[in-house]
Amino acid sequence: MLNLVLFGPPGAGKGTQSQKLIEKYGLIHLSTGDLLRSEISQGTELGLKAKKLMDEGLLVPDEVVIGMIESKIADNRDAAGFIFDGFPRTVPQAEALDQLLEKYDQGITCMIALQVDEQELVKRLLLRGKTSGRPDDADEALIQKRVVEYNTKTRPVADYYAQQGKFYAIDGIGEIEDIFAKSCEIIGACQLA
Ligand code: B4P
């Protein structure tokens, strides 16, 4: 199986690159952001709790997202692989993911980290906010809060994968096709290793 973690700050382009990668490699897309937004639109109890946190630019509790991922992996045991988009976002989530995959004798192939500076992130998300209707893209102060949340809680996840020799960074500024091509090069090298 090919199991990829797509990593980066809010607005780095994880969702954008995921769409291209799932098409090329036939992977199942697991975006915790999308799964949470789906719970919100269905008005579930989980969705109502998550909405409050997401609208404030905060992460939702680890056990909530881990539970969602666990059931999606279990539902797709015959998959060619998974692309984890926006997950794991904390070290406990990364540890839980390794344990979940181990149950199926699987592991993460590599993490691709999209590196984008804060000024560009704010610009992209404010632009997306004009059409996405996402409350968390609505204003600059909220976007900055999400970046702080990323810097304090999510950034250490990169070290977790670096220690396993699975971390690969890419410049996330530039043409979407060029970033995609670099991601494919990394994936090709990891598959051969
Ligand atoms: P997510 O839904 O994961 O979203 P994101 O980080 O905002 O965006 P992404 O990086 O995917 O950006 P995109 O490709 O769309 O998270 C939302 C919230 O859910 C979190 O804040 C948190 O509250 C909660 N959550 C989710 N997962 C969680 C977890 N595991 N634990 C706890 N809480 C969790 O790109 C952004 C924009 O840039 C787009 O408009 C795109 O068109 C543009 N763009 C992309 N690539 C570009 C490029 N190369 N050049 C120019 N523009 C580009």
Image: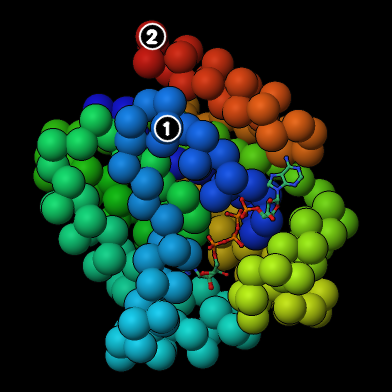
For marks 1 and 2 on the same chain, the one whose residue lies earlier in the sequence: 1
Q: Which residue is mark 2?
A: 192
- Disc 1: which residue: 23
Rendered view: 59 above or below 166: below
For image coordinates 20% across by 36% down, the residue present is 79
**Quadrant into which the C terminus falls:** top left
Q: Is residue 170 left or right of residue 165?
A: right
Q: In the rendering, at what x and y percent does residue 129 appear?
A: 72, 70
Residue 86 image point, x, y percent? 49, 55
Q: Amino acid at mark 2?
A: Leu
Q: Within the displayed image, which quadrant is ligand 1 positioned in?
A: bottom right
How many angstroms separate mark 1 from mark 2 (CA)? 20 Å
| Colour scheme | rainbow
Identify the element where label 1 is drawn.
helix
Q: Is residue 138 above or below residue 182?
A: below
| Residue 75 vertical position relative to residue 128 in the rendered view, above or below | above
In the figure, 143 relative to 4: above or below?
A: below
Q: Is residue 184 left or right of residue 150?
A: left
